[in-house]
Amino acid sequence: MNVRLCNPVKLLGTGMYVPEKVVTNEDLEKIVETTDEWITERTGIKERHIVSDGEMTSDLAAKAGIRALENAGVLPGDIDMIIVGTNSPDMLFPGVGPIVQGKIGATKAGAFDVQAGCTGCVYALVLAAAGIRAGLWKKVLVIGAESLSRVVDWKDRNTCVLFGDGAGAAVLGASGEEDSVLAAELHADGEASDFIELPGGLAANPASVATLEKGLHFVKMKGNEVFKYVNKVIPRFLKDICGQAGLQTEDIDSWIFHQANHRIIEGVMKRLDVPMEKAIVNLQRYGNTSAASVFLALHEGLEEGRISRGDKVMMVSFGAGMTYGAIILRI
């Protein structure tokens, strides 16, 4: 999909929020059989933020959303739609989006969730841009929010060391200026749908004593398979996206990957022949925040001055499904 249709789209502002509680690798050494050295070497993660008792995904999302609106200079009442990418909603329904709409007072906005694994943030961003382009909406609040610590088995060192909680947000709006969206693409590969799962609690495995005993309500992941899949598929995919925009990989000023694993980011950048200095990486502080991770890195990249106005930024994510997607923004 070469996204050049009607109304130009502009990134108006960003925001983020992470819980106050921090769990370091040293803390995890006291819980499971692991070491700071093992976690750092294999993932690049040093610490992660974890929700406190009573703190919900919608709380994180609302706080990040409010900060993004303030950054954009947009009032909640001016938002036409709220789209939340999440894999850890407060409950199956209502969705996080409608709860956030009520929390922030976006009285005229519609709201819904996107569940597309860790790629939910990019799916949500592309949906928002498409809606603005088509003239359906003028301003859209897009949020990625997770409290995956609630669905992680803290006895499983292969998964509990990876994930953190947090929320990031972006405000998109119709613009009379040059279009910010240069290209976008969304994909899925259902043949790899068993690589990352949370199998318990719904239609396939309704909640029962047996599902609890088997730990089916926790994230299950084939980490090696995910690693190999991403390094095989994503480099070619990103080259194709650059081609859609009439760009070469060297024309991209900043690369924002899903913050899953430092080795994955290094591997893809090496295959693209792009220096790591162009990648914005913050997973060492937050871990894998799933559908929130790209927005956290985007916001910090802007706040730290690593991304400047006019820069071309590639945002790419991949996750359960397997889903993957990318969008190139001119900031």
Image (cartoon, rainbow, N blue to C red):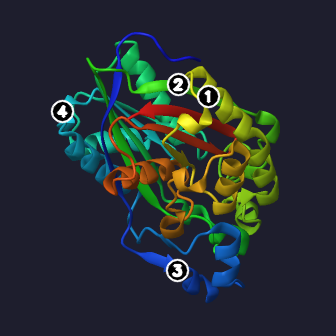
Q: Position of residue 155 (x, y in %)?
A: 68, 77
Query: Could you give the CA–CA distance between mark 4 and mark 3, rounded to whole angstroms?
Result: 39 Å
Image check: 129 left or right of 72?
right
Query: Could you give the CA–CA distance between mark 3 and mark 2, rounded to whole angstroms?
Result: 38 Å
Label 4 is placed on what type of residue? Gly
The reply to whether discs 4 and 1 touch (Cβ–Cβ < 8 Å) is no
Q: Secondary structure at mark 1?
A: helix
Q: Which residue appears at 65% of the width and 38% of the height? A: 324
| 164 vs 2: above or below | below
Frontmost residue, 163 versus 129? 129
Query: Could you give the CA–CA distance between mark 4 and mark 1, rounded to whole angstroms?
Result: 35 Å
Label 2 is placed on what type of residue? Ala
Q: Nearer the viewer, mark 3 or mark 1?
A: 1
Residue 35 seen anywhere in this rendered image of the structure: yes
The reply to whether discs 3 and 2 touch (Cβ–Cβ < 8 Å) is no
The reply to whether discs 1 and 2 touch (Cβ–Cβ < 8 Å) is yes
Image check: 4 left or right of 317?
left
Q: How many marks?
A: 4
Label at residue 241: 1
**Outermost residue to the top:** 6
Q: Secondary structure at mark 3?
A: strand
Frontmost residue, 56 versus 239? 239
Image check: 252 left or right of 306?
right
Sequence-earlier tag: 3 or 2 = 3
Query: Could you give the CA–CA distance between mark 3 and mark 1, rounded to whole angstroms?
Result: 37 Å
Query: Could you give the CA–CA distance between mark 4 and mark 2, rounded to whole angstroms?
Result: 29 Å
Label 1 is placed on what type of residue? Ile
Which image quadrant: the C terminus?
Answer: top left
Q: Secondary structure at mark 2?
A: strand
